Structure formats: structure tokens, C-alpha cells
Image (tube, rainbow, N blue to C red):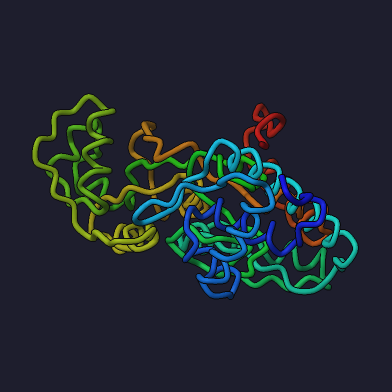
């Protein structure tokens, strides 16, 4: 090794970490706001210092060598600690808290409750963004997210909120018009809102053979609210979350004919970058949200051990 890694500029490590994480010099350049040539030059310079290749150059991307994998993990951990330390020094207990989530969650669960957080934390202004796409918190300037999925996202701290499930929902009038919906097979002749695949999965879980499910109101997005809005208008039966639409169920605007609900994935999660877990505004929102979710759940349920 012709030169010591101790003299390697931090900028080179930062560029290497981005290229390793994104598996692309081009995407690393876009994230860091530099040219692709600058990324390539810095990586080559780092490889010369270490006396070994860190990447295998492939036609459309790059792949880490065994040595590159070891350095990438160390670089990610080190930069995360550095970002966390800077955040601890500069973070203020007020300011703007940027949160991204799916439209249905934002409209049905978060929006009706966010006022309670703002009353208890008047110096924190919440900026809520909705998107059906997975966003990079650091790259998009966001502090936190609510995501639906496995709960495992690299570099993110995840706290389980509640199940992501779908069950048939309709108005009492529609249920009566359909003969009371005594058994799942009664839905085969009903007007259905949602996606064909979700309904096919629900019928399969109910033990009902439904060879040709044709649901209406399909949209390419996370838009349960649209399907449920159609159900509330009396157009038929929609698949929706009994948690997100708990208020409509509680006041009798909707009914849940069957107890069976199918899981879409592992659940809804509150997430944020691991290195920012001590940031005051993030900690304040995390504690409030977990408390709010816990207060609404069955007393037997516990969030202990559910955070990752």
C-alpha cells in the first residue's frame, strides 16, 4: 500500500460510500451533485491508495469486490456516526419536521390526529408529504416516513405501528340490499371496489372459489380512500383497512360484514435514519406517535419488542 488510508480525504470516502450503496457511479454523482467523471476519478484514486480494486466495473452498474464490501460497511457506519454527531450538535427542539407517507394513511389516520402533536409541541411545524413511491429520506430532505412493508430498510430505524390488512367494508344499506351478507360467497354477485388481485386473495383466504373476479374502481396508487369513498356512496363493497377506517366503522357509516382480513404485508412502520434517532424533533414525534398508536390498540397488545 503506497499511501496511508489515514491521509485519504473524507470526500473520497463519502463518494465511495455513495457509489457502493447505489451500485452506480452515475447515481452517486446525481445524489452528491458532482459529475460522473469526478466520482470515477475519486474512486480510482482511493483504489490506488489502497493498492486494490474496490469495484468490478459491469456494463450497466458496478459491483463491490470482497475488499470493497468490507470498506463499504465501515464507511457507511462511520459516516452515519458522523452525521449523527453533527445532528446532535446542531439540532434544535423546534423547526420544521418533514414526514412522508402514503395518501390513505395520511388522510385516514395521521391528519385527524396530528393536531394533538402540534398542540403539545407548538414550536415544531409539521410538513406532511404524500407519495405512493418509496423515497430516500436523506436525498429528498425528509426527516421521517410511515411505510408499509417488511420493516427492514437499510440505514433506517423502524417502529411497528399496526397491521396492514384488508377486509370488505360497505354501508349498512348496501349490506341489507345484498341480503345481509351472511357468508363470504354472498359477495360473488356484489359490486366490488378494489383490485382484482386483492379480492382474489381475500376470496381464497375465505375458502371461496372465485374464478373470475372483476372489481371496479381500480387505481394505480395507494388509494384505499377512493375505493372506500365509493363504498360510502353506496356503490358497493370495497376492500379497506379496519384500522384506517375505524372512525367510519365506529359511527356506523361503514360495517365490516366478515371478521376475515388479509395481510398486505408485515404492517405499517414509522421510520427515520438511524443516525438521527437522537434528534429532538424526531424523538418527540416518535414518542408521540407510538403513544397514540398504543392508546388506540387493545390493552392486551404491546409495542414492546416491536421496534427494530
- Compared to residue 16, the image places residue 126 above or below, namely below
Identify the residue at image location x=25%, y=32%: 182
Q: Residue furthest front?
A: 2
User: For the view shown, which residue lies furthest in the top direction?
Assistant: 207
Q: In the image, is 162 to the left or to the right of 7?
A: left
Residue farthest toward the left in the current orientation of the protein: 212
Residue 187: give x, y in percent of width and height: 19, 40
Is residue 238 visible from the viewing direction of this image? yes
In which quarter of the view is residue 302 placed?
Answer: top right
Q: Is residue 163 above or below residue 220?
A: above
Quarter of the image for the C terminus: give it. top right
In-image side of 54 versus 90 (left or right): left
Residue 296 on image: x %, y %:
64, 43
Q: In this rendered view, identify the residue nearer to me: 248 or 124.
A: 124
Q: Quadrant of residue 43?
A: bottom right
The residue depicted at 70 percent of the width and 67 percent of the height is: 115
- The percent coordinates of residue 16 (x first, y second) are 62, 56
Residue pictured at 59% horizontal, 40% vertical: 69
Q: Nearer the viewer, residue 212 or 113?
A: 212
Asked if residue 98 is positioned above or below residue 203 in the image, the reply reads below
Quadrant (top left/top right/bottom left/bottom right) for the N terminus: top right
Q: How many marks?
A: 0
Amino acid at each position: 500500500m503506497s499511501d496511508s488510508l489515514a491521509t485519504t480525504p473524507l470526500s473520497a470516502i463519502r463518494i465511495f460510500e455513495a457509489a457502493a450503496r447505489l451500485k452506480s457511479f452515475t447515481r452517486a454523482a446525481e445524489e452528491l451533485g458532482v459529475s460522473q467523471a469526478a466520482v470515477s476519478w475519486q474512486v480510482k484514486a482511493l483504489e490506488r491508495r489502497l493498492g486494490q480494486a474496490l469495484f468490478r466495473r459491469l456494463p450497466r452498474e458496478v459491483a463491490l469486490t470482497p475488499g470493497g464490501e468490507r470498506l463499504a460497511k465501515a464507511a457507511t457506519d462511520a459516516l452515519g456516526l458522523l452525521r449523527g454527531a453533527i445532528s446532535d450538535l446542531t439540532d434544535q427542539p423546534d423547526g420544521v419536521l418533514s414526514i412522508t407517507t402514503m395518501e390513505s394513511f395520511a388522510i385516514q389516520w395521521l391528519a385527524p390526529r396530528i393536531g394533538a402533536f402540534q398542540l403539545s409541541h407548538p414550536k415544531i411545524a409539521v410538513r406532511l408529504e404524500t407519495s405512493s413511491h418509496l423515497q430516500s429520506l436523506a436525498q429528498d430532505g425528509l426527516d421521517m416516513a410511515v411505510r408499509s412493508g417488511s420493516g427492514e430498510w437499510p440505514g433506517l430505524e423502524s417502529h411497528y405501528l399496526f397491521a396492514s390488512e384488508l377486509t370488505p367494508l360497505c354501508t349498512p344499506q348496501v349490506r341489507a340490499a345484498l341480503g345481509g351478507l351472511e357468508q363470504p360467497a354472498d359477495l360473488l354477485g356484489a359490486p366490488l371496489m378494489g383490485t382484482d388481485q386483492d379480492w382474489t386473495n381475500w376470496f381464497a383466504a375465505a375458502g371461496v372459489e372465485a374464478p373470475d373476479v372483476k372489481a371496479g374502481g381500480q387505481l394505480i396508487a395507494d388509494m384505499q380512500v377512493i375505493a372506500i369513498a365509493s363504498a360510502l356512496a353506496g356503490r358497493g363493497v370495497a376492500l379497506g383497512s379496519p384500522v384506517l377506517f375505524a372512525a367510519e366503522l365506529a359511527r356506523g357509516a361503514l360495517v365490516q360484514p366478515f371478521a376475515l382480513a388479509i395481510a398486505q404485508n408485515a404492517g405499517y412502520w414509522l421510520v427515520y435514519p438511524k443516525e438521527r434517532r437522537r434528534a429532538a424533533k424526531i424523538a418527540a414525534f416518535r414518542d408521540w406517535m407510538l403513544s397514540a398508536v398504543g392508546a388506540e390498540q387493545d390493552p392486551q397488545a404491546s409495542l414492546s419488542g416491536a421496534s427494530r
